[in-house]
Amino acid sequence: MAKLTANPQDMRVPDPGVRALLEIENRWQAWMDVEVALAAAQADMGIIPAAAAEEIAAKADFSKFDQERLADGFLTSGHTLTPLIWELSRLCDGDAGGFVHWGATTQNIVQTGDLLVLRSVHRILLNQFADVLEALAALAETHAESAMPGRTHGQHAVPTTFGGKVAVWLDEIGRNADRLIAAEPRVFRAMLGGAAGTMASFAEDGFELQDRFAAKMDMTAMAVPSRAEGDHVSEYVLLLALNAATTAKIAREIYTLQKQEFGELEEPTPPGSVGSSTMPQKRNPFMAQDIVALASDVRMQAPLALEAMQTEHEADRATSLQIRQATERSCIATGDMLARLNIILRGLTVKPERMRKNLDLTDGLIMGEPVMLALGAKIGRQEAHDLVYDASQAAATGSQSFLTLLRADERVSSKLSATEITALLDPMAYVGQAPVMARRAAAAGREKASALRG
């Protein structure tokens, strides 16, 4: 049975799994995993007994923790981590419990554990990027030669193809994925600096211990393990915000081109979909609108992520809470956004016949550039521009067609035959390299998608 939700569209979208990873119970388990890594690294160096590290690893399973004790502990202490440490220590046999959390401070564990969670989220998002790239590649390839009006400043410019338009989306989404991959060594870093980032509790073992600790979790170690450094997590939020802008642009374009006045695209509308309780004809682009709203939520987290970098002195609870909120909201919204985009792209109805009709809306005016260039080759570019400008403005404001005016102007007709002028006004013949770009982008997108799935 589908899970009930305030947004009925959510019931039609598979949950990408980000929310479950960000649940507090999963975070708590990640923090315990960090405690296990710490103990194992310390045992390797002889700081704590190997048997203690083994016992800590055996008992650091959140499902074994007494939930009532935890609840009482959180209520009593008001502390983020201490009740979990108490419970893990209690569960450990012998004296092993006394070596739990040896020399570490809360943020060492919590921040590193949260990054383990974020890395799992990151893998989900990369797979979603791969899905989107594959869907875009299919669209670009299928419609490499589907001619449509290219529009600049909201007006017809010169023809392009729908595949060429999708190539732009592919290129940009691909770079957003590249940025996330490139940021991995900067973002997923283990921190073990102790109370104020000085490693004092680990003495001369500090750097080696942190390196071993990080290696246990397949992470890099912070060069300066300061609790005041937050730019790495903020960077991740900012990269998601950048992608949100790209994704919203795509959704807005689909939304716009679905309007009856354009009629060139339509997002999937499953049988039985109700667009309005009172207007039975409505086929609304709900998912495109959802994406625009979700993308806005992601971008709104960017200012908060920047605020979270402004930590006071060596640690600041306020900025820790800020970055957690920014990260959670941006990750959840990104997962939901990409899930919807994938559904739209795979079910998108493309209407080449309507695109062709729209190319003819200006009765040839969209072909002003090729006419100017052909005429310019005979009389010079500037004079040709002036002649075509006069004809196009007269056609736009008068009753005669662009073709008629060009043929009637002796300065034009003396240089270009009627047949040549007619051929120059064929929009299907002036899409340039758009089909090539579409096919190249499709191939690159598929290659990148395969690499992302790794």
Image (cartoon, rainbow, N blue to C red):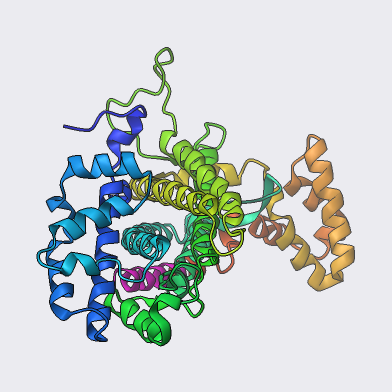
What stretch of residues is rendered in magenta? 441-454
Tell me where residue 102 appears, x and y as whole percent. Answer: 30, 70
Res 381 → quadrant: bottom right
Identity of the residue drawn at 31% across and 82% down: 212
- Of 61 and 242, nearer the camera is 61
Which quadrant of the rendered structure holds the N terminus? top left
Question: Which secondary structure is most common in the magenta stretch?
Answer: helix
Tell me where residue 133 appears, x and y as whole percent. Answer: 39, 62
Q: Does 301 appear above or below 420? A: above
Residue reaching furthest to the left: 93
Identity of the residue drawn at 55% across and 49% down: 299
Identity of the residue drawn at 62% across and 58% down: 310
Identity of the residue drawn at 35% across and 71% down: 103
Tell me where residue 185 appears, x and y as whole percent. Answer: 43, 76
- Of 264 and 298, nearer the camera is 298
Q: Does 143 appear above or below 269? A: below
Q: Is residue 403 left or right of residue 354?
A: right
Tally the numbered discs. 0
Which quadrant of the rendered structure holds the C terminus? bottom left
Tell me where residue 30 appears, x and y as whole percent. Answer: 28, 60
Q: Is residue 344 left or right of residue 15?
A: right
Residue 300 belongs to magenta span: no
Q: Is residue 405 left or right of residue 441?
A: right
Q: Does 315 appear above or below 269? A: below
Residue 446 belongs to magenta span: yes
Q: Is residue 58 visible?
A: yes
Res 27 → quadrant: bottom left
